[in-house]
Amino acid sequence: MPKGTKQAMKFIIYTLLTISISLSSVYAQEDYLSYTDTDLHPGEQVKGSEVEIKEALLPPTQSAEDSDPFEPINRGVFWVNGVFDYFFLTRVSEMYRGVVPQYGRERVAYALRNMNEPIVFVNNVLQGEMDDAAETLARFLLNTTIGLAGIFDVSTDMGFGYKKEDFGLTLASWGLESGPYLVLPILGPSNFRDTVGRMGDYAFDPINWWAYLDEQALYSNGRTGAQILDAKTDNLDLLAELKQNSLDEYATIRAWYKERREDLMIDDVDRRSVDSPRPDDDD
Amino acid sequence: MIKKIVLFSFMLFLSLKAANAATDGTQAEAFMDGIGQNVIDLLTDKKISDQDRADQFRTILDTKFNLKSVGKFVLGRYWKQASEEQKEKFLQLFKETTVASYSTRFKEYTSEKFEITGHRVESDGGVTVLTRIIRPGGQHIPIDWKIFEKNGEYRIYDVILEGISMGITQRSEFASVIQKGGGDIEAINKALGLKLASYRR
C-alpha cells in the first residue's frame, strides 16, 4: 500500500472512531419511566417501557427505533448500489452460479472463510475470549492442513463450528454504541461502529500484512471482490424474494442488518427477548 | 471454565424459573412438533393447487398463530392511533399478504427436514422453541419460534429466522412506510392493498 493511502486510512479510522465515541454518549440517554402527554392522555401520568415512551413523544413521521439521521444520503447510496447490483453484481453472480455447481461454490466459500480465521482469532483475543481464541486457532490449523487450504471444513465435524467475529463486534463488546446507520458504496449496510470495525479488520488482518510485505497488492482487493461475490451468490434468491415481498426494501434491510448484528453480539444465551409480540389483555 | 460454570448456573436459574413460568417449555416444544413439519410439507407441496395451499396455510395462521397480537406489534405506536375500522382492515390485509407471500414462496423447494433442537424460557413469560430446517444439501437454517400460552392455548407470536425477528423487521418496515406517507395509518393499508393486488396478478 502506498504511504499516502495508509495515512488517509489512518485519518479516516481516527475520525470515525472519535465521532462514534462522542456520539455514543448522545445515544446513551437516561431512562425515563413515565411522561405526560396532554393530547393523548389529558391530565394523566403515563407509564411504559423506555421504547414506548420515546415513541409516544415523537411526531408520527419520525422513528424512535432506527438511528438513521443520514437517511436521505443512505437512500441515495442504496439506490446507486441497487443500480450497480442490477447491471453488474447480479449478472456476474448468476453467471458464477450457472458455471460453478453448488459443491464447487461451497469449497470457495469455505476457503474464503478460512482465510478470515486469523482476524477472527485477533478479535477473540481483543475481546478476552481466550477459549474461543484457542478454538479458532485449532480450526484454522486443522482446516488449512487436513482441510486442504480450508476448502473442506473438517473442524466442524470434530465439534468446532465456525463463529463469526469482527472488529465491529469487538468494539461493541467494549461498550461502543453502534452510532448512525450507514449504507456504504458497494459494501452495503453498516453503521459507524461497524465501518470503523471493517477498516480495523482490514488493517490488522495478518493475511493482509503478509500480502502487504510480500507486495501482493492485488490480493486484498481480489479477496474482497470474491467475498462480495460469494455473499451475493449465496443470497441471490433471498434478495430477489425481498425485492418482491417488501414494502420498503431499504427499511427492511436496515432492520435486518441491525437485528443480525445484535444477534451476533449475543453469545449463545438469552437474546433481548422482551421486544417481541406478546399476548395482552384485550385479545 | 469459569464461563462454563456461569453458563451452567444461568441455565439452572432458567430451568428453575421455568417451573413458575406461564408457558411450559416442553409443552411448547410438543406444540411446535405438531406444526413445523406440517407447514414445511404444505409449503413445499407441488401436487396441490396454489389456491388450496393458500387456504390451508391461512387455516394454520388462524389457528396456530396469534395474528392479532402480531399485527398490533408490527404496527407499534400507530395501533393506538388507528380507528377500529382501520385496525380491522389492517389485520385483514396483513393476514392476506402473509398468506400470499408465503404460500407460493417455497413451492420449488424439495424434501426439507424439520428438527427441534431445544427451547429457552424467556423473561417475558414466553418460550422460544429452537428449531432448524435441514436442506437437501445439508445446510442448516435455524428458525426460532416465540410461543405463549394463553387461556390454555399455545400460539406462535414471532418467527426468528437466523437470528432475525420477523416481527421486529416488519415493524420497522411498516413504520417507515407510515412515516413516508406523512404519518398516516392509511399509508400502510394502501401499500398492503397494492402489494396484495400485485400478488394476485
Image: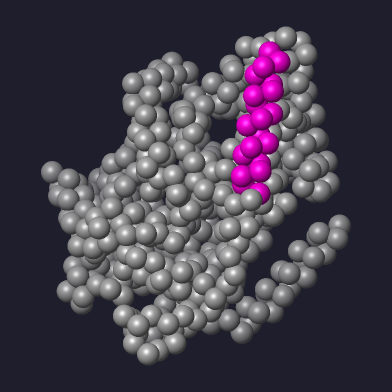
Counting from the top left corner in percent of width and height, residue B125 is at 54, 77
Q: Measuring 64% from the left and 51% from the top, which residue is drawn there?
A: A22
Q: Which residues are magenta?
A: A1-21
The reply, left or right, for residue B126 in relation to residue A73 is right
Q: Does residue A27 lie above or below A58 as drawn?
A: above
Q: Name the residue nearer the viewer: B27 or B187.
A: B187
Q: Measuring 46% from the left and 69% from the top, which residue is drawn there?
A: A54
Specify the farthest residue to the bottom. Answer: A43
> How many tags in the picture?
0
Q: Measuring 46% from the left and 73% from the top, which residue is drawn there?
A: A53
Q: Which image quarter: residue A204?
A: top right
Q: Which image quarter: residue A240?
A: top left
Query: Is residue B178 something that shows in the picture?
Result: yes
Q: Does residue A138 lie above or below B117 as drawn?
A: above
Q: Name the residue nearer the viewer: A41 or A100.
A: A41
Counting from the top left corner in percent of width and height, residue B14 is at 67, 73
Counting from the top left corner in percent of width and height, residue A247 is at 29, 49
Q: Which quarter of the image is occupied by the N terminus of chain B?
A: bottom right
Query: Is residue B99 something that shows in the picture?
Result: no
Specify the farthest residue to the right. Answer: B1
Image coloring type = one colour
- In reply to whether residue A3 is colored magenta, the answer given is yes
Q: Measuring 55% from the left and 21% from the top, which residue is drawn there?
A: A226
Q: Name the residue nearer the viewer: B152 or A64.
A: A64
Q: Which quarter of the image is occupied by the C terminus of chain B?
A: top left
Counting from the top left corner in percent of width and height, residue A196 is at 63, 38
- In reply to whether residue B185 is colored magenta, the answer given is no
The reply, left or right, for residue B192 in relation to residue A155 is left
Helix, strand or loop: magenta stretch:
helix
Q: Name the residue nearer the viewer: B151 or B157.
A: B157
Q: Does residue A57 lie above or below A111 as drawn?
A: below
